[in-house]
Amino acid sequence: SSSSAAVAPPVSVPRPVLTQEDLKRIAAYKAVDFVESGMVVGLGTGSTACHAVARIAELLRLGKLKNVVGIPTSKKTEEQALALGLPLSDLVAYPSVDVAIDGADEVDPWFNLIKGRGGSLYREKMVESRCGRFVVIVDESKLVKKLGEGGHAMPVEVVPFGWNVTLEKLQSLFKSSGCVAQLRTGSDGKPFLTDNLNYIVNLFFKNGIEDIHSASDAIKRVVGVVEHGMFIDMTTTLIVAGTDGVTLKNK
Ligand code: 5RP
């Protein structure tokens, strides 16, 4: 018969809302596509990078990756990787790293970064300056027009001896731009200690960092400075996860 059965109206299935954690994981998994068997891989630090570490360990466990050696950029990442059975080594044994994957606190339009709000900037920069490909993974909230805009911290690792002198000198370098320098402390009020047993001085720029190259040079000339959190001209691949999808851009 030609009876027309009632057609159910289309049901609109709500798109699952992606949390920031989902976005971090999506970016991290995409970055792990660059990891191949036999590679030496720099393992970043932080809540985004830890998804990449977990994914690499999983692929090794499943036999989809073989003979990968990780170079951790912090004690925290080292602990995570060891707990997951990911083989680790260091820059003494492997001074060249094939690919490194890490998060960032801020990314500017030229893929320059602020890193180190987790305090691991020295080891991160050391490992990431030795790699053939540096894949940066962020959710879209990390994108900025200018590093340091919004008055967020740009961390500088300093030697504890004479830290107050180093802090004063750093602040005076950028006095005209209203920069405030502050020793990072923990919840106990004591100075935050890096993995290298150094301190962190946070620099707060009112209107962002005017000229990152000259700021970098000036900071590096201060006695007592170990390293700063600007990662300039280091990123080779940027992966951004947003609510509209993932984008991958090569420098
Ligand atoms: C730690 C870092 C981190 O990569 C940076 O702080 C980003 O962390 P998260 O992915 O948790 O936002 O530089 O020193």
Image (cartoon, grey):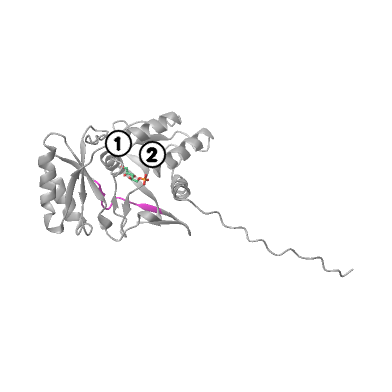
The percent coordinates of residue 215 (x first, y second) are 17, 53
Query: Could one spot residue 147 in this view of the protein?
Result: no
The percent coordinates of residue 33 (x first, y second) are 47, 46
Badge 2 density bin: few <14, some 14–19, many ≥20, Cα 10 Å:
many
Residue under the image location 49 percent in, 35 percent down: 60
CA gap between label 2 and label 1 equals: 11 Å
Q: Is residue 234 magenta?
A: yes
Amino acid type, mark 1 = Pro
Give the residues drawn in magenta, as a range: 229-239
Residue under the image location 43 percent in, 29 percent down: 83
Q: Residue furthest bottom?
A: 2
The percent coordinates of residue 175 (x first, y second) are 12, 54
Quarter of the image for the N terminus: give it: bottom right
Q: Nearer the viewer, residue 226 or 17?
A: 17
Q: Which mark is residue 41?
A: 2
Q: Nearer the viewer, residue 152 or 59?
A: 152
Query: Could one spot residue 9 in this view of the protein?
Result: yes
Q: Nearer the viewer, residue 126 or 93?
A: 126
Badge 1 density bin: few <14, some 14–19, many ≥20, Cα 10 Å:
few
